[in-house]
Image (cartoon, helix red, strand yellow):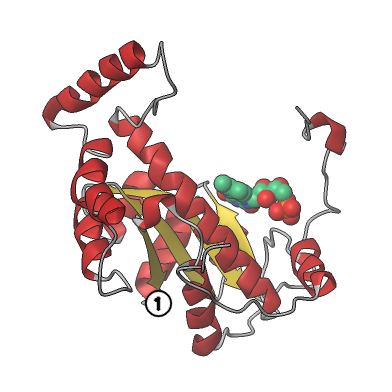
Amino acid sequence: MSKPRYHESVPAINVEEFRKVVMSRRSVRRFDDTPIPDAVLQDCLDMALLAPNSSNLQPWEFHVVKTPAVKEALAHACLGQNAAKTAQELVVAVARLETWQEHCDMMLENWPEETIPKVVQSYYGRLAKIYYNQGPMNILGVGKRVLSKVTGFSRPVPRGPFTHADMKVWAAKTVALATENFMLAMRAHGFDTCPMEGFDAHRVHKLLDLPSDAFIVMVIGCGKRAADGVYHARIRFARERFIKTH
Ligand SMILES: Cc1cc2nc3c(=O)[nH]c(=O)nc-3n(C[C@H](O)[C@H](O)[C@H](O)COP(=O)(O)O)c2cc1C
């Protein structure tokens, strides 16, 4: 057996503790006035940033809204939902659709070994820059789509991203994974969350002065659940409906 290039130790894990975190996470619509210690919030954000992400290009941002007037305007933009109005903290999870180029360069700059493997150099230096680039007026995307259709007849090929919409999906997948890390981390610290897509994206974009390539994935209300914070027992349909074996 060949010597592994890299090794890190894996801690022992109690699955029942993890299960408690997963089972007790509920979407909480009403929070009490217990503040969230900043160390807890920062720890949860740090854990969010450890989520798996596409090509490690980390197209995420988390905007923590602290200024009372901005927070109030944000809750208003969340259509006045209780989960936003009563939240101790509001965190806006944003996907960035154009940071990937800089992050390709940063991957090479931050590579953790002295010698960057050729395959890594080639991926971040060349391939990824074609893969995620749709070109002006989507011209490159159209070209890539045609090429993939033709070469796809004879062998497996990537079928996207080829459009701006594909890039949104690409980034949103990664950001959604990070938000789940964040919400589970909050729960593990004894706090609660409510993910929200019920918001006025135009208003939130303006309020946070986001750049044009920013796509708001979710607003997350955070705090300690109030006694009446969970509206009803959890509903999940039968697992047979969703879990398929091939
Ligand atoms: C992408 C997304 C958007 C959501 N938007 C809202 C929302 O705007 N308001 C709200 O009260 N709940 C929202 N929810 C929470 C869901 O309604 C909730 O997760 C679902 O009913 C299951 O309940 P549970 O989270 O307690 O298991 C959202 C959840 C997700 C994942």
Q: Quadrant of the N terminus?
A: bottom right
Residue 159 horizontal side relative to residue 205, left or right: right
Q: Nearer the viewer, residue 207 or 116?
A: 116
- Looking at the image, which residue is at 48% across and 73% down? 45
Please state the horizontal and vertical placement of residue 36, each as a whole percent of the image: 57, 83
Q: Residue furthest front?
A: 1
Secondary element type, mark 1: loop
Query: For the residue marked with disc 1, what is the amino acid?
Result: Lys
The spot of residue 77 in percent (x, y) is 43, 53
Determine the residue positioned at 51% across, 68% down: 4
| Drawn side of residue 125 relative to residue 20, left or right | left
Dot 1: few (<14), some (14–19), or many (≥20) neighbours within 10 Å? few
Image quadrant holding the C terminus, namely top right
Residue at mark 1:
66
Disc 1: residue Cβ within 8 A of ligand 1's nearest atom: no
Residue at 24 percent of width and 26 percent of height: 141
